Amino acid sequence: MQIKDRIRQKRKELGYTQEQVAARLGVTAPAVNKWESGMTYPDITLLPPLARLLKTDLNTLLCFRETLTKEDIASILNEIAQTATKNKSDGIEKAFLMIQEKAREYPGHGELLYQLAAVLRGLTLMIPCEKNLYEKYGDYARRLYEQAADSTDVLYANRAKYALASEKIQNNDFDGANALIAALPDYESLDKRLLLISLYMKQNKNGEASQLLEQKLSASIQEVFLMLDQLATAAVRENDSRRAWELADYAQKIMGVYNWEYSAQSVAMSVAVEERDAEKCFRILEAMLASLSKPCLLADSILFTHIKKNTFPVDFSQNLRNTLLEALEKEEKFAFLRDKKEYFDLLSKYM
């Protein structure tokens, strides 16, 4: 919340009109109106009497807060995501402006900066946009990660460094990636969730224990999936196609717990692309794209009955489909598919 919003909020809570505030402070009503519209700010000498009039303190009036709760951050991120998806034509640009505003409001808050960058990156993957906008949003997300990496929040500073290192690897900046990796702590296996799970089980709080177990299991499955994808790709490069496809089959079985065919086929797609096998690529792409027209009922999985998961909204599936088709059209690794009849058949069917 900005000072303009705080003044308006407190004034209305107390039942004052702009004219009454103006009269008590010895200013004009248009001046108060400008404060509340954000066109101007109160003179510094007026801040103490304004705070007293509105029955608040200067920190609150100036919207100065050193910390945000997890709930505060979740609310901010949710509002940004809703803005992006509800406004069809310019939703992502409006969300971007909100992200900029929050980053200016809390320039040293490592967790918020990291989460804002992650959300912005996610939105650009889900919502197709012009190349110049895609680059603008990507550059700003990178700056947010860099700010978070310099923050005093060790946890999110390290997560930001991880994200930056990952991007540098993708961009072949190996020296930059190595420098960031060297600044990260060594892997630690200790996880306080394990202690909490043990505590809840001892206290017979089985629901709480189950929820934590499912969260940890889900994160572990995703980590295994990413490693299988890399292992399968490495196997192709080692000329071991049989092993690569066995790994892809194994990944499909593991990801089957999510009841989502799209992710279950992802490793197979990586192998087919690495082998430049166009026939298999199109067969897998057909299955992936077709899966996006069906509901994804994550809650049906027996492994995740305590985690609150709903069917993906239609817009999410449509955006993911568009992102995949755009990648086929633009990314170099898919170039060998673009002169095939099946490629144009896919476009005509799903565009």
Image (cartoon, rainbow, N blue to C red):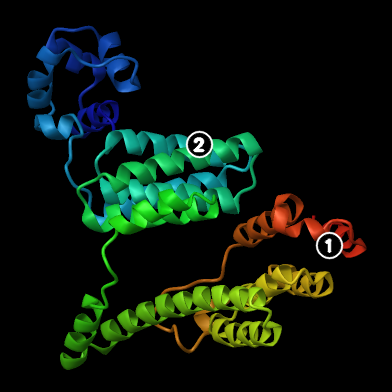
Cβ–Cβ under 8 Å for marks 1 and 2: no
Tell me which corner region of the image, top left, top right, bottom left or bottom right, holds residue 142.
top left
Near-viewer residue (185 or 323)? 185
Instruction: Identify whether 309 is placed above or below 15.
Output: below
Q: Identify residue type, mark 1.
A: Leu
Report, in whole angstroms, how far the alpha carbon at label 1 lies from the one at label 2. 32 Å
Instruction: Locate the N terminus by quadrant.
Output: top left
Helix or strand or loop: what does disc 2 sit on? helix
Answer left or right for 148 relative to 125: left
Tell me the residue that label 2 is attached to: 94
When asked about the image quadrant of residue 156, the answer is bottom left
Residue at 51% over, 85% down: 301
- Res. 299 in view: yes
**How many numbered circles does the render carry?**
2
140 lies left or right of 296: left
Residue 88: percent from left, percent from top: 62, 43
What label sits on residue 346 in the rendered view? 1
